Amino acid sequence: MEKKLFKLLTRYFFIGILAAFIELSSFSLFIKHINYIIANSLAFCLAVITSFVFNRVFNFKVHDKTIIRFGRFLIVNISGLCISNFILFYFSGFMPYIELKILSMPVVIFFQFVTNYLWTFKK
């Protein structure tokens, strides 16, 4: 893997950890009070905003076309949300929601990195 791509992937990983922490923390809080799909969607939105800001500024370092890039990022993340919600819905009843959420995250993260790298933050 080329050095630049490795650096991007490493930073994306750490930004993802921060976003995942925010997502899991808020999901754990929200699920106590509201439906699991709504809780997942709200938590996912908080993670998306965090991830966009940090990836735009510190990882991919692009400062142009902010609205267009955020629109693309939003499309990628809504697709990721759909994947996440599908996994939660399809496998609900097999294990606790929080475990399903954790298991769904690597699938969603991989999909989003590839799509963001090739489309959202492409220079």
Image: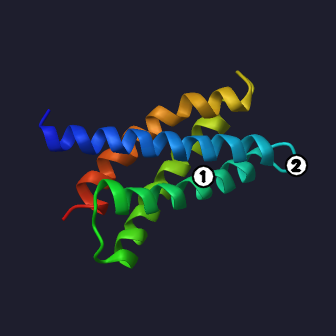
**Image side of residue 42 versus residue 116, left or right:** right
* Image quarter (top left, top right, bottom left or bottom right) of the C terminus: bottom left
Q: Which mark is residue 33?
A: 2
Could you say where residue 63 lies in the image, as x and y percent from the top left?
30, 72
Could you say where residue 42 lies in the image, as x and y percent from the top left?
68, 56
| Residue lying furthest right | 33
Kind of residue at disc 1 = Phe
**Image side of residue 62 versus residue 78, left or right:** left
Q: Nearer the viewer, residue 31 or 86?
A: 31
> In this orientation, does residue 89 appear?
yes
Measure how far apart labels 2 and 1 are at the Cα level. Answer: 16 Å
Q: Residue at x 56, y 53 (%)?
A: 47
Q: Residue at x 32, y 51 (%)?
A: 115
Q: Nearer the viewer, residue 115 or 55?
A: 55
| Residue lying furthest front | 58
Q: Which mark is residue 44?
A: 1
* Image quarter (top left, top right, bottom left or bottom right) of the N terminus: top left
Q: Residue at x 50, y 39 (%)?
A: 17
Could you say where residue 58 lies in the image, as x and y percent from the top left?
35, 57
**Image side of residue 58 versus residue 105, left or right:** left
Q: Which mark is residue 117?
A: none
Where 71 sits versus 10, above or below? below
Could you say where residue 16 lies in the image, as x and y percent from the top left?
46, 43
Question: Would you call the spot at circle 1 few (<14 residues within 10 Å), some (14-19), or many (20 or more)?
Answer: many
